[in-house]
Image (spheres, rainbow, N blue to C red):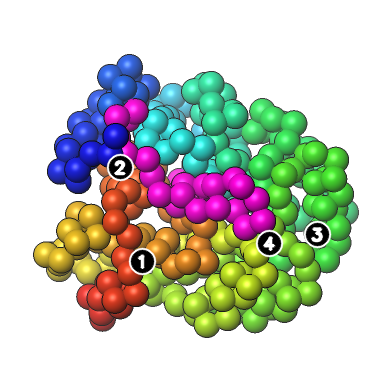
Amino acid sequence: MPIDRRTFLGLSATLAALPAGSALAAAQAATVEAPMRRKIPGTREQLPVIGMGTADTFNVGRDSAERAPLTEVMAMLLQRIPNPVIDTAPSYGAAEAVTGDLLQSANALSKAFVATKISTSAANAMTQFTRSRMELHSDSVDLLQVHNLIDWRDNLKLVRQWKDQGKTRYVGITHYREDAHEELAKILRAEKLDFLQVNYSLGERNAEKVLLPLCEERGVAVLINRPFQDGRLFSAVRGKPVPDWAGEVDCTSWAQLFLKFIVSHPAVTAAIPATSKPKNMADNLGAAFGRMPDTRERARIAAALA
C-alpha cells in the first residue's frame, strides 16, 4: 500500500542511519513505496529510473576500511531499489572487481541489472570481456556497451555476436561529451541498438535537441551519465536554499531536483549517478519516488538554476 511522502522521508532517514545489511533496514525498505520504473523499449522489462554509476567512486583496493562505505552504498541501493541498474567499465580501474565482489558478498548477483563496456580495440575485446565477466563473477551481463565509440563498428559486431551467444542481453553505445552527440545520432540512425548511454543534465542539455527524440523514435533505451555535471551543478546552487515549491514534486534537495529533471524526460530510462557516500546515495534514491515533474515543473527547475 502506498505511503505518504512524510512517512517515506522518515523511513528513508532512518534507513540511511542503520547499519548496511541489517534486518531492520531491509524490513523498513520493504515498506516503502515502489520506485518509478521505465520500460526498455520493445520489451516488457522495466528498470528503476535511478541506478548507480561506478566511475571513480568504486576504484578502491581490497582493504575492508576502503570498501566499507561502498558496501553500505551498495546495500542501500539494493534494499531500496529492486533490480537497479549498476553501470561499470574495465577502464574504471578496480570498479568492475569491486562491483562484482560487493554484489557477490550481498548474494545479489542476480538482483541487479549489470552494465559494463568494451573500452579497447576489437582485437583485444574478447580478452577484456572475459576479464570483465571474471571480475563481475558472472558468465554474462545484462548490457554490454561500446565505450566512447572506441572502434565502434568492429566492436558492435562482436557485442552482437556475444548477444547471440547469451553473454549479454542488450547491446549499446556510450559517450560522455556533447561534441560526440552528432556522431552518436548518425550511429543511432544507421544501427539497431538497444541502449544509448549519454551525458545529460541541467548544465548539459544538448541531448534534448536530437538524441533523446531520436531514441524515442527508434525505440532505444537511454541511460544518463554525468547527471550532476561532475559536481558543477552543486557549485551553481551553493548557498541557495531548495525552493519551497520542490515539495510539489516530492523533492527535498537540489540533487533530487536535478535527477527528477532528467528522469522526467519521456525518453530517459534511468540516470546513473555515482557516489561513494551513503548519505548521498540516500539522497539520490529519493528521486526515484513520488511525483515526477511535468513540462511546466521541468521549466521551473531549469529556471531555478539560472
Which numbered disc, 1 or 4, marks the residue closer to the eye?
1
Above or below, 27 against 193 in this view is above
Q: Earlier in the sequence, mark 2 or mark 1?
A: 1
Q: Residue at x 61, y 66 (%)?
A: 175
Residue range (magenta): 29-57
Q: Earlier in the sequence, mark 4 or mark 2?
A: 4
The image quadrant that residue 67 belongs to is: top left
Q: Secondary structure at mark 3?
A: helix
**x and y percentages locating residue 200 in the rendered image:** 47, 69
Above or below, 94 against 186 in this view is above
Mark 1 Cα-neighbour bin, 10 Å: few <14, some 14–19, many ≥20: many
Proximity of marks 2 and 3: CB atoms separated by less than 8 Å:
no
Label number found at residue 173: 4
Q: What residue does disc 3 label?
A: 156
Mark 4 Cα-neighbour bin, 10 Å: few <14, some 14–19, many ≥20: many
Q: Amino acid at mark 1?
A: Phe
Q: Amino acid at mark 4?
A: Ile
Q: Secondary structure at mark 1?
A: helix
Q: Secondary structure of the magenta portion, mostly?
A: loop
Q: Is residue 56 magenta?
A: yes
Q: Secondary structure at mark 2?
A: helix
Q: Quadrant of the N terminus?
A: top left
Q: What residue does disc 1 label?
A: 261
- Mark 2 and mark 3: Cα distance apart in space: 36 Å
Q: Earlier in the sequence, mark 3 or mark 4?
A: 3
